[in-house]
Image (spheres, helix red, strand yellow):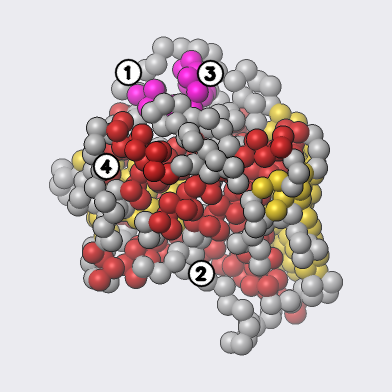
Amino acid sequence: MNRLHRRKFLKNTTSAAVGIISAPYILSSCSNAPSKQITLGMIGVGNHGVSWNMKAFLEFEDVRILAVCDVDSKRKDEAKKIVDEKYQNQDCAAYNDFREVLARNDIDAVMISTPDHWHVPISILAAQAGKDVICEKPSLTISEGRVLCDVMKKHNTIYQTSIEDRAVPVYHRMAELVRNGYIGDLQKIIIRVPDDDVIKLHPASTETQPVPPGFDYDMWLGPAPVAPYAPGRCHFNFRWISDYSGGMLTDWGAHYVDTAQWANGTDHSGPVSVEGKGEFLSRGIYNTANIFDLMYHYANGVSMQVVSGGTSIGFQGTEGWIQCLGWRGELEASKKSILNAEIKSSEIHLYTAKSEHRNFIDCVKSRKETYVPVEVGHRTATALHMGNIAMQLNRKVYWDPEKEAFIDDDEANALRFRESRDPWKFDDLVV
């Protein structure tokens, strides 16, 4: 297993922060004060960071947003304005560098809504600074995800993988019915995620241009390789570039595969193999897979097909099927008795909540594990990274979920991690 030598990584990154994150971890006082107002810093305040994440937290009376942070000064200033208008004051601080948020002793937790390549480094530094973390999915690599889990455990950090599906009634209901055998023994899962049509909704030039004023492009790149600035490289469209993301497979796929593994009871392990075909974008700077058909297999005999084109998830069992076509669509089944089934008190009741955000705040107070804890989020991301690796190698790969390594496959194992740029370098990897 390739792992980051955490001590050196944290030493390197804290040095880059000019010593602002050198204090030892101290358990948040909120663990002893359930009614305490939780103070929050928002790191990454683009569209999703504001319209989904920040909007939700602003509605909670027991949460106070003290700071917003973004490398894009326009977005940063707009987010501060929203917070100040909500609280009717000018108290919200606005930062360009997330390390300034982490250095504040008066902030209990952070919401990380950055591009994927920043998720793990910021989360690690946040835990080192004594903050609890709610972070968007997914990780960038399998190895980074493992390091993330280890660091969160080391610091007793409350961590929420920011996925709403477990709080969405239709997906919770579906998973619970499957887990309790209402379609018989589960045999196959079929998932469809959008293809590259979504790119057309967010057109932006991919031609090299001067960096716009107020945009710290070097910080945006962070651990990723140096690359010339283009509007189509940043913000929403980072998803189609492998230096920053795994494409639509890891983006939309994280939602449905999380539900799939939840229903299959494998969300703490994962599949044992994957094979399939994919077509990779070749439009200038874009290079992630946009068309794919992958088949995963689990040790319990269940198969899971993940196909591009559409939005749906369905489960086939020995005694029927159940599915949801479209995002949060109406639940359908082969028999009405499945849809009308009442989960008995003696059966499995899956952990849900009003929302990912409410669940996180409640867990910060209680120190209870969140409904999508770091290990679960890592296992979902691992399955998706496996799919990208299989497509990249154009062959079937076999996985050991316990050792978290590909079986007798040095070529695949080498793709579990990537080098990172100084001062965010993931070095001293050990096998």
Task: Mark 1 or mark 4: name the one nearer the start of the chain.
Answer: 4
Q: Tell me where the magenta segment starts and ends, as one range.
A: 216-233
User: Distance between the Cα atoms at labels 3 and 1?
Assistant: 17 Å
Task: Mark 4 or mark 3: name the one nearer the start of the chain.
Answer: 4
Where residue 273 sits in the image (x, y, percent)?
76, 50
Where residue 276 sits in the image (x, y, percent)?
80, 41
Residue at label 1?
A: 213
Assign a secondary structure to mark 3: loop
Residue type at tag 2: Thr
Assign a secondary structure to mark 1: loop
Task: Mark 3 or mark 1: name the one nearer the start of the chain.
Answer: 3
Instruction: Inspect the magenta stretch and tell me whether residue 223 lies in it.
Output: yes
Mark 4 or 2: the one toward you: 4
Residue type at tag 1: Pro
Q: Quadrant of the C terminus?
A: top right
User: Distance between the Cα atoms at labels 2 and 3?
Assistant: 41 Å
Mark 4 or 3: the one toward you: 4
Q: In screen coordinates, is 343 left or right of 368?
A: right
- In percent of the image, x 66 and y 47: which residue is there? 405
Assign a secondary structure to mark 2: loop
Residue 21: mark in rendering: 4
Q: Residues within 10 Å of mark 4 (few under 14, many from 20)?
A: many
Where residue 151 sits in the image (x, y, percent)?
43, 51
Task: Mark 2 or mark 3: name the one nearer the start of the chain.
Answer: 3
Residue at label 3?
A: 205
Residue type at tag 4: Ile
Residue at label 2?
A: 352
User: Distance between the Cα atoms at labels 1 and 2?
Assistant: 44 Å
Q: Residues within 10 Å of mark 3 (few under 14, many from 20)?
A: few
Question: Which residue ends up furthest to the right in the rendered image?
Answer: 318
- In percent of the image, x 68 and y 73: which residue is there? 179
